[in-house]
Amino acid sequence: MSDKADKIAKIKPLPDSKPRYARVLLKISGEALMGKEQSGLDLATVDRIAGEIKHASDIGVQVCLVIGGGNIFRGLQGAAQGMDRASADYMGMLATVMNALAMQSALEKIDVQTRVLSAIPMTTICEPYIRRRAIRHMEKGRIVIFAAGTGNPYFTTDTAAALRATEMGCDALLKGTQVDGVYSADPKKDPKATRYDRLTYLEVLARDLKVMDASAISLARDNHIPIIVFPLHKPGTFVHVLCGGGPCTIITDKAAAPLS
Ligand code: UDP
């Protein structure tokens, strides 16, 4: 184990950390794995996020992951340069498999058992996606990493995250971002952007808030899976949010209680 991995593995969650959720899906965008780089993988960042996932597992939460591929390739980019869209999307899905393998390696370095399950069968490097098998892995305490999105072009890994969270019977879908929740506009560009603590799925759709794509929000809404948007780049926030604290925006069916 490297010194850094060793250090991460030794950080223990607070003793009174009581998770609110038994099983969650964490969606990590490809960009979250770039660290300060402009593209590709920053392995120190992957190691840090792996440490966060280990903490969640240590406090008894069953965690599965969907990882994007935008740090390596997006289908739309390829299509914009003249590629056939479906082929470009398959390349995007392959990028998610590379990220999944990087995360698996980082988790196994700190002694976390993992399985990568790909929506596009590649049996030499990972297991094919089989729903019951994925559930069984989680019941055994393994971190399941879903790779290759939904396996279909014209979709995104956000939709894959909502789909797998539904199939796995997750209590929540957590989306790690670079900011501390959902804003009315991009807070990096608009200083007047306001932050929301709570939103409904319908508000996200009607205001076209850039949280996840509309099909992912609709799927979560149809299946009543809360979406929690939180800053994955802030160390410790994942476990904090799982225990009901931390900066985040919660998206459910229910509107925020009116101020009295
Ligand atoms: N993709 C796809 N079908 C899926 C999931 C992903 O075709 O079900 C492709 C699509 O081209 C997408 C790329 O994979 O651009 C990478 O995924 P995404 O853009 O969702 O990654 P993220 O933005 O989360 O890093």
Image (cartoon, rainbow, N blue to C red):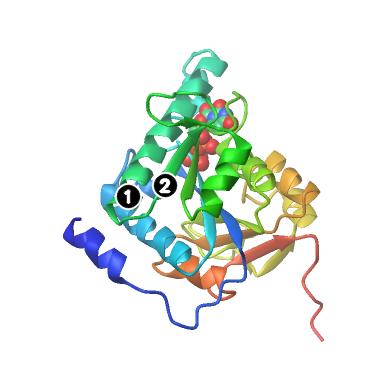
In front of the other: 146 or 41: 146
**Image height of 159 relative to 28, above or below:** above
Residue at image position (57%, 27%) is 151
Structural distance between the alpha carbons of marks 2 and 1? 7 Å
Residue at image position (53%, 63%) is 61
Element type where label 1 sits in the image:
helix
Mark sitting on residue 197: none
Most extreme residue toward the bottom is: 260
Q: Circle 1 is placed at which residue position?
A: 108
Disc 1: CA contacts within 10 A as few (<14), some (14-19) or many (>=20): some
Q: Circle 2 is placed at which residue position?
A: 114
Q: Position of residue 158 (x, y in %)?
A: 59, 42
Residue at image position (34%, 39%) is 39
Q: Position of residue 153 (x, y in %)?
A: 59, 23
**Image height of 203 relative to 239, above or below:** above
Element type where label 2 sits in the image:
strand
In front of the other: 103 or 137: 137
Q: Are marks 2 and 1 in contact (CB under 8 Å)?
A: yes
Q: Amino acid at mark 1?
A: Glu
In front of the other: 62 or 102: 62
Q: Amino acid at mark 2?
A: Thr
